[in-house]
Amino acid sequence: MLVRPATGGVAAVAARTAKELAAHGWTVTDIPLPSGGAPARVGLRALRSLRNELDRAEIVHVEFGCLDLAPFWFAELAVALRRVVVVAHDSPSPIKAPATGLIVTGTRWRDVSAHRVLAPVLDRALVSVVQRRAAAVVVLDDAARERWQRAGARNVVAVEHPADPPTPGSTPPSEGGHVLAAGYIGPAKGLDVLIDAWQEVGATTELPLVVAGTHTGGVDGVAYERALHERGRGLTRPPRWLGFVSEAELGRLFAGAAVVVLPYRRSAPASGALVRAMVEGRAVVATQLPGAFARLRSEVDALLVPAGDVAALGGALARLLHDPCLRDRLGREAADHAAARFRWPGYIEGLERAYRLAGAAR
């Protein structure tokens, strides 16, 4: 049984994981959990409705990123009943404000109070239950593995983020039609830094800056995205805001980009956007964070800049936009690196290793 979010990047990886496991001989029941309502209630309702499947399942596999509260709450409840294998996509915080899952997400005073008052009191305890009681844990880099082990987790397996092959017939970065920033919109993603850098760079290129993604919900997320839109409206070449896009459309956006920019202030162990950009052979500008350092070589397959540095980010973007040959060289190196590293067989092998450890756990 594979329990996962219904939408988003983690959902896409998990849905593909179900298919890959089936191709390797596993019988998989794929359970997407919706994001609406109170996530704890969604998780409890799913647990009750799936009791028969839980009893029959050899492995209960639960997958979530830091914003996927419903699958996290399913794991929170299921670890008391079954041996659960958790796949945690994000670190150092595997889930954001899990206590807010006790009520419906929104912007009313009780929702805001839950996020700012209740969550800090309960969050650590809720995360600790999953960390200590999961039979096995799968994470996406060695640093995350060490953090889970220090928190008391057993049987922690580190694997590389998987990726599909590149889009057939995609154009080289020198012929790309836009600069792309993709993923959820929040302060950690550094889009305010990118907008400030684009104020100078955008006036020197015909290529548009395209932003695909939406905020994380709640009053803070809405306010942050609204402030970004207002900030961008004052530019000579305002960003093009696409909001939420399908996985198919996101793939086309990556395949047609001249440059992919990741101006993050903080990053997960493995950025799905970074992996996709490398697989598609794009020229990448990224900030000097552990998730990028572990996968990119500056001046070889990307340009790396300090986090929060507007001038450095703008300079790297300008350099790539005015040098199509450099874009193609970095893109080729990134694609070669990705083809050797981000492979589904290796990812499935890591999952199966975690399954074996979970089966042996008391």
Image (cartoon, rainbow, N blue to C red):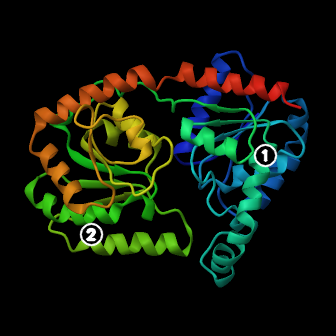
Image quarter hosting the N terminus? top right
Mark 2 residue type? Gly
Disc 2 vs disc 1: which is toward the camera?
1
Name the residue carrying label 2. 232
Determine the secondary structure under disc 1: helix
Left or right: 7 as drawn, with respect to 61: left
Taking the spot 14% from the left edge, 58% from the top edge, the residue there is 201
Q: Do the CB atoms of the residues marked 2 and 1 lie less than 8 Å apart?
A: no
Chain-order first, disc 2 or disc 1: 1
Tell me, for residue 132, which label it has, or none: 1
Taking the spot 87% from the left edge, 38% from the top edge, the residue there is 82
Left or right: 112 as drawn, with respect to 41: left
Mark 1 residue type? Arg
Mark 2–mark 1 Cα distance, whole angstroms, equals 44 Å
Taking the spot 10% from the left edge, 40% from the top edge, the residue there is 323
Taking the spot 33% from the left edge, 70% from the top edge, the residue there is 229
Judge by depth and name the residue closer to the eye, 66 or 143: 143
Left or right: 344 as drawn, with respect to 287: right
Quadrant of residue 310 within the rendered picture: bottom left
Q: Residues within 10 Å of mark 2 (few under 14, many from 20)?
A: many
Determine the secondary structure under disc 2: helix
Image quarter hosting the C terminus? top right
From the top left corner, tell me how far across and down residue 174 is, in percent: 15, 35
Task: Tell me if residue 264 comes above or below residue 298 in the rendering.
Answer: below
- Residue 82 appears anywhere in the view: yes
